[in-house]
């Protein structure tokens, strides 16, 4: 039972390194999906949203964690 | 199969597997040092058998999934996994969180196992074997995910799997020769590099899953690798600077 718990915890930990980063990445992908499927914009705009959004979220998450650690 | 996508897939599987196998090896070595090679060997074998069962169960399911849905699901999971690793690697590079220390982990595992076996005087071999099994299973889950994630979207499961197996063989061979934790492996540098590749694959597959045709097709992946590398380094640099500002 403990082993099963550890496996489940490991699986969750693999994809939820930081709660807000996870939520924000899912939000960015959802926004890109909406742009691609429900607007007349070039699908590449959705691709750019995913790419640029993830790059910004990564830098922001590292910076925020560093500030929280230092404070 | 094109080299522009096969090479990063195999490299990512190989390097990620080195990191995970080194971590599992440290714990298996602690078990072997304390309780002998027999429980370490059966724990490792049982862990590998469980991982093989997971792969055999998932394989047919992946074959049945529609390719765009599969790419989207794998892309999102890769983004979450890769960016999580990259965030941690950047924080480690900035000195915010400590580097992975295999020697310290070896000592902690040995002490914990020793305490556990003292508490339960019976089934000492069993406790030791289960510890090895857990280490192989938990670290191996990440290897299985990475191999499936970088391989399934374009029929690269076999090359990615071979990359992971090559890493296992390399680490086990070196481990058997030196017979101590492989603390000189630059784990954070490897994790930084692998997470950059995984994040790039994540954006690529997510886009393909959403029906986006990337300009330059597979070559776009190389641009994503460069951009995530720069983002990781910028993040580490900002983190280091903010740490120094607070220290003043």
Image (cartoon, coloured by chain):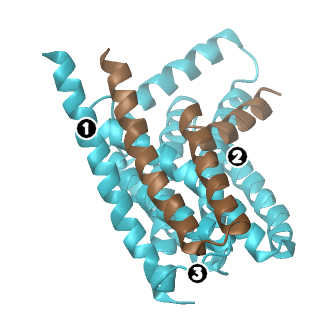
Chain colours: A brown, B cyan
In which chain is the residue bearing label 3?
A: B
Q: Residue at the location (37% across, 44% down)? A: A59
Question: Seen in the image, is A7 located left or right of residue B200?
Answer: right
Q: Quadrant of the C terminus of chain B?
A: top left
Q: Report the Cα–Cα distance between label 3 and label 1.
A: 33 Å
Residue B149, horizontal then vertical, whole percent: 63, 64
Q: Along the polypeptide, which appears first: circle 2 or circle 3?
A: 2
Numbered label attached to residue B213: 3
In which chain is the residue bearing label 1?
A: B
* Above or below for B24 versus B205: above
Residue A68, horizontal then vertical, whole percent: 38, 20
Compare residues B208 and B22 and report the one nearer the observer. Answer: B208
Residue B201, horizontal then vertical, whole percent: 53, 66
Question: Seen in the image, is B71 located left or right of residue B63?
Answer: left
Residue B85, horizontal then vertical, whole percent: 47, 46
SS category of the residue bearing label 2: helix
* Above or below for B155 versus B74: below
Q: Which residue is mark 1?
A: B238
SS category of the residue bearing label 1: helix
Residue A20: image quadrant is: top right
Compare residues B74 and B29 and report the one nearer the observer. Answer: B74
Q: Which residue is mark 2?
A: B42
Q: Residue at the location (75% across, 23% down)? A: B123
Q: Along the polypeptide, which appears first: circle 2 or circle 1?
A: 2
Q: Residue at the location (38% across, 72% down)? A: B223
Same chain for mark 3 and mark 1? The answer is yes
Q: Report the Cα–Cα distance between label 2 and label 3.
A: 48 Å
Q: Nearer the viewer, mark 2 or mark 1?
A: 1
Q: How many marks?
A: 3
Q: Quadrant of the N terminus of chain B?
A: bottom right
Q: Along the polypeptide, which appears first: circle 3 or circle 1?
A: 3
């Amino acid at each position: 039972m403990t082993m099963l718990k550890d496996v489940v915890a490991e699986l969750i930990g693999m994809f939820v390194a930081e709660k807000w980063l996870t939520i924000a990445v899912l939000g960015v992908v959802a926004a890109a999906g909406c742009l691609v499927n429900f607007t007349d914009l070039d699908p590449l705009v959705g691709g750019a949203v995913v790419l640029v959004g993830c790059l910004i979220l990564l830098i922001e998450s590292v910076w925020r964690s560093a500030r929280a650690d230092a404070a | 199969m094109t080299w522009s996508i096969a090479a990063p897939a195999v490299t990512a599987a190989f390097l990620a597997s080195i990191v995970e196998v080194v971590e599992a090896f440290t714990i298996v070595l602690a078990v072997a040092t304390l309780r002998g090679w027999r429980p370490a060997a059966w724990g490792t074998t049982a862990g590998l058998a469980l991982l093989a069962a997971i792969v055999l169960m998932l394989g047919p399911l992946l074959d049945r999934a529609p390719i765009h849905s599969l790419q989207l699901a794998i892309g999102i999971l890769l983004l979450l996994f890769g960016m999580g690793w990259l965030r941690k690697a950047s924080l480690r590079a900035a000195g915010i969180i400590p580097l992975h220390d295999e020697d310290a982990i070896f000592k902690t595992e040995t002490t914990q196992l020793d305490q556990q076996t003292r508490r339960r005087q019976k089934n000492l071999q069993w406790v030791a074997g289960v510890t090895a099994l857990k280490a192989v299973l938990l670290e191996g889950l990440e290897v299985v995910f990475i191999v499936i994630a970088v391989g399934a979207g374009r029929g690269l499961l076999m090359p990615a799997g071979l990359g992971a197996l090559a890493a296992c063989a390399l680490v086990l061979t070196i481990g058997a020769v030196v017979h101590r934790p492989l603390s000189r492996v630059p784990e954070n540098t490897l994790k930084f590099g692998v997470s950059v590749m995984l994040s790039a694959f994540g954006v690529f597959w997510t886009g393909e899953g959403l029906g986006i045709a990337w300009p330059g097709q597979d070559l776009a992946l190389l641009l994503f690798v460069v951009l995530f590398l720069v983002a990781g380094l910028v993040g580490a640099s900002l983190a280091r600077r903010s740490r120094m500002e607070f220290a003043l």
